[in-house]
Image (spheres, rainbow, N blue to C red):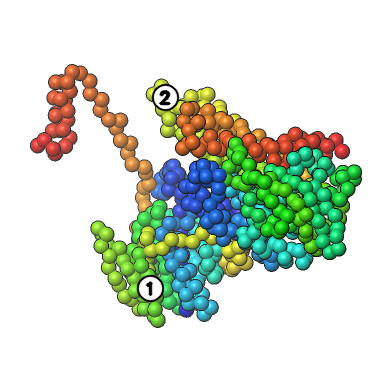
């Protein structure tokens, strides 16, 4: 059995983001990066399946990006992935979801993966398109926002999270792709002995040019923080006056007094 | 020169950080209040490999290096100085000398249980009348057939309360001073070992600091560690390495206090502005951070020198001295920045202030560190 988990490295979301010089994405200088949260659920689920299937099973982790993404790859290896693919791309952040999916599909198309795991979406771009697009490009089954996962003899039974806390059960035959959501599992900590073992695992580097033949379909044209909100209005005067002013504002700015 | 951590060390740092954030930080106040690190946490830290980071896998260790160990102690101590010193004393003061001076048989016998946390290690050197002057050791041993018989008392033994494994120092002839001292590996579950008390302390209250009476403690002759009469060298070499652990603990305590002080200075408003807008606070933050960064550079460098098997005696003395003084300085300033709230336990900086002080004292007082450094400068 062959498994693939696709991960992305994203900035710490508590960082202060500034636009880059082209104004189409954030400036990466001084940002601390970590594995995309949803991808951690994907790695954990993939490792659990890998452990359940035993020796005949092989789990590969793939990430696209500059050298820093190797850190996230190494974490996945320490969590239990067997080997890794680093698609080297110093301009990954400027690629649209279609291109990113195309890179993954180009790598995966002749490898015969039985199950592919991805996060539900990335915490920075948040398109939630890459996983489903990979499935479409590979022509395999797919289900999203998975919060429960059982594999048995070529069939995946997945629990999906819908709006308003409603869940749905989905059965799909492998090969299949699932996108993983918060609540699926609790990702394990990489232990020190496993970090050591991970050092001996293979990371194959592939230049992105070897895998990418697609032009973007939706290029980001601008990146900007939300407009600053006004500082609020301070009213002064006697009580009667204040009430009149408040009523005027409520009539003008809101629907409550119309 | 490269001042960046390797990717492997960054992976480790972030893994330890995640663990500490979820498993230790939420209970750090309770550890201090209860004077106890919960057994469940000790087990979890052992499962993470924190108790055998730099020993080879064949002895049950994680097989990493001294820098990894320093990072583990630092990150743990950011949240809890007690847990930091548990790891430090266990690793560098007990497993360390067994790994460095032990025979292959001794390593195979004692290290796996230490590295997996089944036994917690301690270092039994200090006595009521032999602190900095270890040559004044009064605990005596004599040979009887295939055994050594040990009598005396030991005090201020970090981790002693776990009654795990100890590296113990005793003399066979007090008149020989340090040349009469030998080192032994001791199972503290043996008859003749009595805990007199676990001390009630100002800080690192979750960590055991134990006083022992040793009354006809019999240990097999094979438990002699290193060469008979060379125990003082074992102790000094061990403390050299141990200082990197204490420097890391002190560094972590300082960083933990700084993080809180920085955040608080941005939140707290007085005279209609955040207090970090006042230069009085800004200058404190600048001084605190500079001390932390210099401590970190010294500590990581000492660890890297040990990894490279180069001489590191002066560097370990310098990092221990500087990081511990940074810890007391930074925690004191962090409390000052917090004002009255800093004195309240919920804000945690008062605990860090209490935890910091011991780092200037144990594993060689800072006065001893200055002796070590100046002796090497003048030799």
Label of residue A150 in the image: 1
The residue closer to the viewer here, B254 or B149, is B149
Image location (x, y in percent) of residue A237: 20, 18
The residue closer to the viewer here, B2 or B192, is B192
Name the quadrant containing residue A180. bottom left
Q: Please, which residue is most extreme toward the bottom here?
A: A153
Q: Is residue B215 shown left or right of residue A101?
A: right
Q: Can you see residue A211?
A: no
Q: Is residue A159 shown left or right of residue B151?
A: left
Question: Which element carries disc 1, helix, strand or loop?
Answer: strand
Image location (x, y in percent) of residue A168: 27, 68
Question: Which element carries disc 2, helix, strand or loop?
Answer: strand
Q: Please, which residue is most extreme toward the right here?
A: B175
The residue closer to the viewer here, B41 or A162, is B41
Q: Can you see residue B216?
A: yes
Q: Please, which residue is most extreme toward the left here?
A: A258
Residue drawn at point x = 85 percent, y = 35 percent: B378
- Quadrant in which the C terminus of chain B appears: top right
Image location (x, y in percent) of residue A132: 35, 67
Per the image, the residue denoted by label 2 is B270
Label of residue B293 in the image: none
Residue drawn at point x = 78 percent, y = 58 percent: B218
Question: In 3D space, how far apart are the residues under numbered discs 2 and 1 (Cα atoms)?
Answer: 56 Å
Image location (x, y in percent) of residue A8: 46, 59
Label 1 Cα neighbours within 10 Å, binned few <14 / some 14-19 / many ≥20: few
Answer above or below: position of B268 versus A113: above
Residue drawn at point x = 71 percent, y = 44 percent: B155
On what subunit does the disc labeled 1 rest?
A
Residue drawn at point x = 53 percent, y = 67 percent: A80
On what subunit does the disc labeled 2 rest?
B
């Amino acid at each position: 059995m062959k498994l693939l988990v696709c991960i992305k490295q994203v900035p710490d979301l508590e960082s202060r983001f500034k636009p880059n010089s082209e104004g189409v994405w954030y400036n990466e200088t001084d940002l601390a990066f970590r594995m995309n949260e949803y991808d951690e659920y994907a790695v954990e689920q993939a490792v659990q399946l890998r452990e359940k299937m035993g020796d005949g099973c092989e789990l590969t982790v793939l990430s696209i990006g500059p050298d820093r993404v190797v850190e996230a790859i190494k974490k996945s290896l320490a969590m239990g992935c067997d080997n890794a693919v680093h698609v080297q791309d110093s301009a990954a952040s400027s690629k649209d979801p279609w291109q990113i999916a195309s890179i993954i599909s180009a790598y995966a198309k002749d490898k015969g993966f039985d199950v592919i795991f991805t996060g539900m979406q990335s915490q920075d771009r948040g398109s939630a398109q890459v996983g489903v697009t990979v499935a479409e490009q590979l022509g395999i089954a797919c289900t999203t926002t998975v919060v429960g996962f059982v594999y048995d003899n070529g069939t995946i039974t997945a629990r999906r999270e819908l709006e308003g806390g409603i869940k749905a059960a989905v059965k799909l035959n492998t090969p299949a792709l699932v996108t993983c959501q918060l609540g699926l599992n609790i990702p394990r900590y990489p232990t020190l002995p496993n970090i050591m073992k991970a050092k001996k695992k293979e990371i194959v580097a592939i230049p992105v040019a070897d895998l990418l033949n697609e032009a973007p379909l939706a290029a980001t044209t601008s990146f900007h923080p939300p407009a600053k909100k006004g500082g609020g209005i301070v009213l002064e005067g006697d009580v009667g006056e204040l009430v009149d002013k408040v009523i005027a504002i409520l009539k003008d700015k809101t629907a409550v007094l119309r | 020169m490269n001042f960046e951590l390797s990717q492997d060390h960054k992976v480790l740092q972030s893994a330890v950080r995640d663990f500490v954030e979820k498993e230790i930080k939420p209970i750090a106040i309770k550890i201090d209040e209860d004077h106890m690190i919960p057994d469940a946490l000790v087990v979890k830290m052992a499962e993470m490999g924190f108790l055998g980071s730099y020993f080879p896998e064949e002895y049950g260790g994680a097989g990493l290096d001294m820098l990894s160990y320093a990072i583990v102690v630092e990150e743990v101590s950011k949240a809890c100085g007690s847990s930091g010193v548990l790891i430090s004393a266990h690793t560098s003061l007990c497993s360390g000398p067994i790994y460095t001076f032990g025979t292959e048989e001794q390593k195979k016998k004692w290290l796996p249980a230490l590295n997996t946390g089944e036994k917690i290690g301690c270092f039994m050197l200090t006595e009521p009348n032999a602190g900095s002057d270890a040559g004044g050791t009064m605990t005596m041993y004599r040979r009887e057939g295939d055994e050594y018989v040990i009598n005396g008392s030991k005090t201020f033994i970090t981790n002693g309360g776990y009654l795990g494994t100890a590296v113990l120092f005793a003399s066979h002839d007090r008149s020989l001073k340090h040349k009469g001292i030998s080192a032994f590996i001791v199972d503290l579950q043996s008859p003749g070992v009595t805990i007199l008390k676990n001390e009630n302390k100002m800080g690192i209250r979750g960590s055991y600091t134990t006083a022992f009476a040793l009354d006809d403690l019999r240990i097999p002759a094979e438990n002699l560690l290193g060469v008979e009469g060379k125990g003082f060298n074992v102790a000094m070499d061990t403390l050299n390495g141990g200082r990197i652990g204490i420097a890391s603990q002190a560094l972590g305590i300082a960083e933990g206090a700084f993080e809180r002080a920085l955040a608080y200075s941005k939140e707290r408003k007085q005279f209609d502005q955040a207090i970090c807008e006042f230069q009085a606070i800004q200058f404190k933050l600048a001084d605190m951070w500079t001390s932390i960064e210099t401590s970190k550079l010294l500590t990581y460098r000492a660890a890297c020198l040990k990894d490279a098997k180069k001489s590191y005696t002066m560097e370990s003395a310098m990092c221990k001295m500087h990081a511990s003084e940074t810890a007391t300085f930074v925690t004191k300033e962090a409390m000052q920045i917090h004002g009255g709230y800093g004195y309240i336990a919920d804000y945690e900086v008062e605990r860090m202030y209490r935890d910091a002080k011991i780092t200037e004292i144990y594993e060689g007082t800072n006065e001893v560190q200055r002796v070590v450094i100046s002796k090497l400068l003048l030799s």
